[in-house]
Amino acid sequence: MDIFTQGLVGASVALSGAKKEEVKKALVIGFLSGLLADADILIRSGNDALLTLEYHRHFTHALVFIPIGALIAALLLWPFFRKTTAFPVIYKYAFLGYLLSGVLDAFTSYGTHLFWPFSSERVALHLISVVDPIFSLSLLLGIIFSILYKNKKFAYIALSVCLTYLSISYLQVQRVEQKITDIAQQRGHDIERLVIKPTMGNIILWRTIYLAKGEFVVDAVRAGFSETTSYQGKTAKHITPDIFADIAPTGSVLHEDIQRFNYFSDGYLAWHPDKKNVLGDIRYALTPDSISPLWGIKFNVKHPEQHIKFTNFRKIDKNTRTRFINMIQGVKLD
């Protein structure tokens, strides 16, 4: 999730294990330790644009790395607390703060190497977006009340609210899956692959992408309190790395980069409809019914020895913002 929420989760977990007289200390150590896993974003290369994608949410988010990450956090924080706090206590709160960093990110759609090095699978449960104000605000209020009343029960309450929120989101996914399955059947489609993703900041409006007959079919589904409604999107041809065999021979830099991006995208590759020669990850878009990917790669077929270029398209105009809000509200679109 966003880095601020990562810190809030770390602080909340640390507070839940804190003594009454150590609430503030646990808050600071837990919050800062909760941020450390995302330091993997600093792993980057000026020549290899995919290196950051490969190592973001990688080993620093793995379950086996928790004690190591906590130790690094404790060592970094020790100079600031050593006069008042024993190192084992610092490590305790650092461990609690770091504990759920990887698990939290696994609830989003980006994908997390939670079981590295035993598995290379990117775990993505698709239950919450990287930014969700209800989730974050619940944690923030729990922390504030814990400090004001020096009582960690508010941290427990906040974590319970967040767990309940994720449970509700899981039920939302089941409703959306049933809706899109029914729609696919009406279209005469047999779903070969399906991904359901929450849209930014809510668990009401969802983006669905399924593969059928060699094409990705994109729709938006609004799971309201009483009924589910859909907004029909468009289709895009499924692109597989093997079509580049002639221009990206095995062993070339270009061949490896295309394979790496395909792995990162979990095979959801499609050409950008408006950007020439941009191969995108169709799982992500600015609006849930769009086939214009949020990011993609460009490459020069004349130079297979060169790395690809990674590009993104994050500009949100007024029409895009209005369309998104109308979908959340359930407004019928033209």
Image (cartoon, helix red, strand yellow):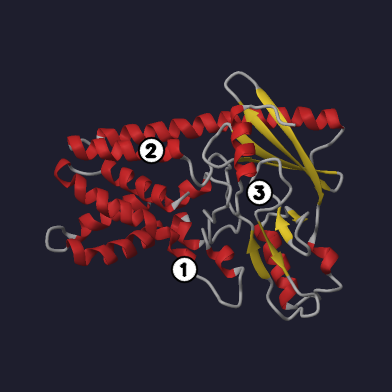
- Front residue (pair 294, 214): 294
Q: Tell me: residue 28, above or below residue 197.
A: below
- What is the three-letter code of the residue carrying label 3? Ala
The kind of secondary structure element at disc 2 is helix
- Ranked by sequence position, the earlier of labels 1 and 3 is 1
Residue appearing at x 87%, y 73% in the figure: 246
- Front residue (pair 114, 188): 188
Label 1 vs label 3, nearer the camera: 3
Q: Can residue 173 be seen in this snapshot?
A: no
Measure the C-alpha gap from mark 2 to mark 3: 25 Å
- What is the three-letter code of the residue carrying label 2? Leu
Q: Which residue is mark 2?
A: 137
Residue appearing at x 57%, y 43% in the figure: 125
Label 1 vs label 2, nearer the camera: 2
Left or right of residue 297: residue 125? left
Residue appearing at x 84%, y 70% in the figure: 245
- Front residue (pair 201, 149): 201
The kind of secondary structure element at disc 3 is loop
Q: Which residue is mark 1?
A: 42
Measure the C-alpha gap from mark 1 to mark 3: 25 Å
Q: Tell me: residue 75, above or below residue 237.
A: below
Measure the C-alpha gap from mark 1 to mark 2: 28 Å
Q: Which residue is mark 3?
A: 285
Residue appearing at x 31%, y 36% in the figure: 141
- Measured as percent of width and height from the top left, residue 85 is found at 15, 58
Q: Tell me: residue 200, above or below residue 263.
A: above
